[in-house]
Amino acid sequence: MRICLFEDRGVADLDPLTLTRPAFDLLCGITSLAAKQTRFFAPCTSGALVRPFLADLLRERRPDLPVNDAAWLGQGPTVLVNARWLPPDGLRPDLTGESFVATIDGEVAYAFVTPELLAGVTPGNIDLHLEEWKSLLPRREAGGTMIGRPWELVERNGEEIERDLRARGDRGLNKRPMDFSLVGPAGRLRLDPSAKIEPLVVADTTNGAVVVDRDAHIAAFTRLEGPCYVGPGSQIHGAKIRGGTSIGPYCHIGGEVEASIVHGFSNKYHDGFLGHSYVGEWVNIGAGAQTSDLRHDYGEVILTLGGLRIPTGSHKVGSFIGDHTKIAIGSLLNTGSNVGAFAGLLPTGRLLPRCVPSFCRVNDGAVAENEDCEILFATAQEVMRRRGVELSETQLEVYRRVYDQTALARRQTLRENERPRMRRTA
């Protein structure tokens, strides 16, 4: 069994989360999308087709993984798996016989294809090949879910925690420290033996599992409500972690977090509310910063994505924040905010703009461009070094490419913001 995880044009609709990583590295539940896809097919070997500017970074992090490797693709029949696909429960499909495509609402979730059909497939033309295969090959129903927008990861996070836990079995061993309070079924509690749990911690498993991974530290006066997950090495500082929340590895979390995903290495140490949001890596959220996730009229939340206003179909949507963004103390993020990578938000005493492009800052309520991106990269290097992580030249080159690729979005947003100011001046 050979699988190749691929990115299609739909990854652009997952900005800002996919600006700096392949879509299959996004977190939902306990694991990444890639881990779920690999678990579903149980392959003997795997490869990847990703946007070219991410290829070297993926090779650096996964030296064993063939990335954008045409020779590897041609070595045998392969299952091409869409990076945005959440597989269903159950056994993998029969992958013997003729080639076919498996779809969800017309989108290809995966395709079983021969080396002849794979000839000439590249990250740049994969969408053309998918359209051709849909017209030529037999179709099957894939099952599962295709992630099309950032908020869909948040909406499915709680149920994915439960599914991932079932797939893990009882490997997340159960221990009960002294002075630990449990509300709900004990069978839904999973505390890794290496996790440090201080006295006066409450876990509520009434509505779902509470999972604390290896080397995590849960400080006194923390409340964990299931379904929730605390990743390896993360520290929870007397926080309220509500249901539907996943905290990735090596985060520092305080205050109140509800139905949100924090990808990893991010800091929300102090009080403040984060709700129905997805926070990328190396983000810092200052003391007292708040994210609104509900309109005052309880209406449907509209989010700006790719310059378009997109109805979310939900009345509970928070903020989506790209990597290395800094949110200062007392900042107020509006419902349905989209904040790019390497952004800087300063408080104004009122709600900040909903759309802040990558490499921009908000100062006195106005969006402006951070023109010297090398200063931002130097800050990122220092932040990472303090956590014992080096910013590699390959990673730095990805950030520079993201700066170039997001230039048009910055210019468009700045022009749109300038028009009302000029009308007021006139």
Image (spheres, rainbow, N blue to C red):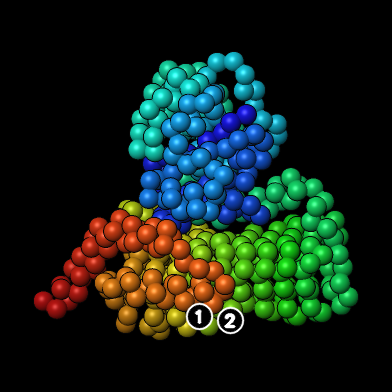
Furthest residue in direction left, as rendered: 426
Secondary-structure class at tag 2: loop
In 3D space, how far apart are the residues under numbered discs 2 and 1 (Cα atoms)?
A: 7 Å
Secondary-structure class at tag 1: loop
Look at label 1 and name its amino acid: Gly
Q: Up-down: is 11 above or below 137?
A: below
Q: Residue at coordinates 20% horizontally, 70% vertically from top-left? A: 418
Task: Tell me if label 2 and label 1 are in contact, CB under 8 Å.
Answer: yes
Residue 14 lies left or right of residue 63; in this view the side is left
Q: Is residue 208 visible?
A: yes
Q: Residues within 10 Å of mark 1 (few under 14, many from 20)?
A: many
Q: Residue at coordinates 32% horizontally, 70% vertically from top-left? A: 373
Q: Position of residue 235 (x, y in %)?
A: 67, 73
Residue 299 lies left or right of residue 170; in this view the side is left
Q: Is residue 297 visible?
A: no
Q: Residue at coordinates 37% horizontally, 73% vertically from top-left? A: 376
Circle 2 residue: 270
Circle 1 residue: 286
Q: Position of residue 410 (x, y in %)?
A: 27, 63
Look at label 2 and name its amino acid: His
Please tell me which residue lies in front, 52 or 85: 52
Q: Position of residue 219 (x, y in %)?
A: 73, 78
Q: Quadrant of the N terminus?
A: top right
Q: Residue at coordinates 41% horizontally, 25% vertically from top-left? A: 119
